Image (tube, helix red, strand yellow):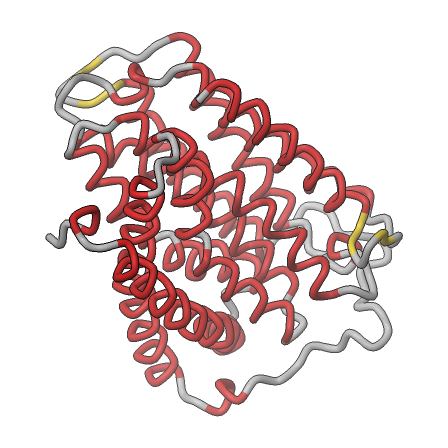
Amino acid sequence: MIDFRGLPLPVNIAVLLVSAAIVWGAGTRMARLVDAIAERTGLGRAFAGFLLLGGVTSLPELATVITAAHGGHANLALSSILGSVSTNVLLLALADAVLGRDALTSVVAHPATLMQGALGILLLGVVAAAINIGDVELFGIGVWSAALVPLFGLAVWLTSRYENRPTWMVADGAPLPGLAPAEPEELKLDLRALVTNATAAGVVILVAGYLLAESGDAIAVQTGIGANMVGFVLVGLATSLPEISSMVGAVRIHRYELAIGDIFGTNLFDLLLIPIADIFFRQGPILAQAGRFEAVAVVLGIILTSVYVVGLLDRRNQTVLRMGYDSLAAIVAFGIGIVLLATIA
């Protein structure tokens, strides 16, 4: 393993910039490939974004969290996970601004995205309970951490079932004028070629995303920022770049359910990293090490996700500064949350 903290600061900056460019290209390509796979298989774009885009774009976080947990840095591992959750949801405001003309939540008519958001809030609530109550170890892993595994499986099952059998539909669910879905070049490929290309893009995202996160962490330490805020802001932002690229790519080809499914799906996969980190953390249940910082961070994730669930229910097509009111509210909430976290760190 490369010790990025031992490298000169200019080298880490160069690694970060090159890795960021590679991740951006691979993430944009991945969005188009997943869209084509959803079209070929009938998987459904909301579920494809949740399972495929969400799973792949969360891979760089896996390496970062395992490294932190194995090194005994429980707070860094947890703050990295929870920082990514909040940052990922905030990225929907960026997608909203890219869309520009209409509020993002007003053009998403499939209720599967609501299911994904609600399930994300459920798992975040479990994490919040674990932090406040405390965790106990059983067979080498915390009980609360272990509970996240079957809950994640339940979330995948419910989302896949709900994708093709929604129990209700939006009354005015037709696409807005001028927003007909684009036809990416990837639709010309057969399924085998799509899967092969998607796998290659996923490997690129994993490797470049890991380099991006590690160099970002090293830069933060070398510039003297506190450990908790490193994990929450810089590392969280660095590991969110795959989501940014894939989400923006999805919005540009008018696959809005794919974009939102990417974000909500990534967050569920990120929370699955908690039990994985617990396995590598050998000083007791990792959630038992969480403090006020992590408690506020998980509540911030719940608030931000709830804002967009409300937006998806309301579907108000009014914009301010090229984004919907829900995106504006999310930005304000995130800013307040960062200020609170900075006072605790």
Q: Nearer the viewer, residue 33 or 282?
A: 282
> Measuring 69% from the left and 39% from the top, which residue is drawn there?
330
Q: Nearer the viewer, residue 289 or 191?
A: 289
Residue furthest bottom in the image: 188
Up-down: is 23 above or below 291? below
Up-down: is 250 above or below 334? below
> Measuring 25% from the left and 63% from the top, which residue is drawn there?
207
Up-down: is 342 above or below 264? above
Q: Position of residue 206 (x, y in %)?
A: 29, 61
- Using the rendered image of the protein, determine whether residue 309 is visible from the camera's viewpoint: no
Quarter of the image holding residue 23? bottom left
Q: Nearer the viewer, residue 126 or 155?
A: 126
> Measuring 10% from the left and 52% from the top, which residue is drawn there?
1
- Using the rendered image of the protein, determine whether residue 308 is visible from the camera's viewpoint: yes
The number of callouts visible is: 0
Q: Position of residue 255 (x, y in %)?
A: 63, 68
Quick one: quadrant of the C terminus?
top left
Up-down: is 242 above or below 217? below
> Measuring 34% from the left and 85% from the top, which residue is drawn there?
193
Left/right placement of residue 281 relative to residue 219 reads: left
Q: Position of residue 251 (x, y in %)?
A: 64, 68
Q: Position of residue 299 (x, y in %)?
A: 55, 24
